[in-house]
Image (cartoon, helix red, strand yellow):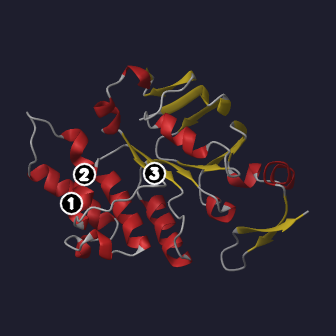
Amino acid sequence: MTLEAIDLGFRLRGRDLLDGVSLALAPGEVLGLVGPNGSGKSTLLRLIAGLTRPARGCVRLDGAPMATMPQRQIARRIALVAQSAETSDRITVRDAVALGRTPWLDALRPWSAEDDAHVARALRRVDLAHLAHRDWSTLSGGERQRAHIARALAQDPQILLLDEPTNHLDIRHQLSILSLVGDLGLSVVVALHDLNQAMRCDRLAVLQGGRLQALGPPDEILDAALLARVFGVRATTLIDPEDGSRVMRFLPF
């Protein structure tokens, strides 16, 4: 499935949150969104998820304008894990993940064994099957984040959108979540703050002030000039002797 954003623009209270953003997601790739706070990452994710209508431009799903599609049809193809996803309800982990099946259910298609199978598979993929009957309130931050991803996977999407999935997690859980995302085999768009974590992505889209500043492989676009211009930092590059990967160190001007 292909996803393409064409000249997207969005305004709120007279301010441009996105202006002229165009990009395409290749099947099976992990595309990272990076940029300073307020650069438009979350807004872009909501637009390409079909949750917000652009003021200008369009989003195409397999060549068809998303604006013409029913929300249920979009939700069967695209799943979003929002940065603020949370619940205060007394609910088990399994029941939270089962909410992901909602787009597939209606009066003519009630819950079935197929839905049970999707939920069980999603829990296994994030290594939470052993906590299926635990109360949501007893989960750690990392476990809750994995459960949110499991809920999205239970939708059986072809495209997964993640808004800061490592936010507020300790380093062990951050690495666990990033490894999980890379192993899913889905087309993924993920907003990240940590540029060293973003180096794991196939390509990066760099946003600043709602505009797309660069798009391409991390090693090619994250150069000293761009980091200074967009993020306001000096950067030096080190090579990790463990695996030869590039690691960036940041300094103020």
Mark 2 lies on a secondary structure that is helix
The image shows a total of numbered marks equal to 3
Q: CA distance from mark 2 to mark 3?
A: 15 Å
Whether pointer 2 and pointer 3 mark residues with C-beta atoms closer than 8 Å, the reply is: no
Q: Quadrant of residue 136?
A: bottom left
- Disc ID at residue 82: 3
| Residue bearing the label numbered 2 | 99
Q: Quadrant of the N terminus?
A: top left
Tell me if mark 2 has few (under 14), some (14-19) or many (20+) residues whose alpha carbon lies within 10 angstroms of its own: some
- Residue 139: x %, y % from top left: 34, 74
The type of residue carrying mark 3 is Ala
6 left or right, relative to 251: left
218 left or right, relative to 181: right
Q: CA distance from mark 1 to mark 2?
A: 7 Å
Q: Residue at x 50, y 60 (%)?
A: 165
Residue 137 makes an appearance in the image: yes
Whether pointer 1 and pointer 3 mark residues with C-beta atoms closer than 8 Å, the reply is: no
Whether pointer 1 and pointer 2 mark residues with C-beta atoms closer than 8 Å, the reply is: yes
- Disc ID at residue 95: 1
Residue 65 makes an appearance in the image: no
Q: Residue at x 76, y 53 (%)?
A: 222
- Residue 9: x %, y % from top left: 62, 27
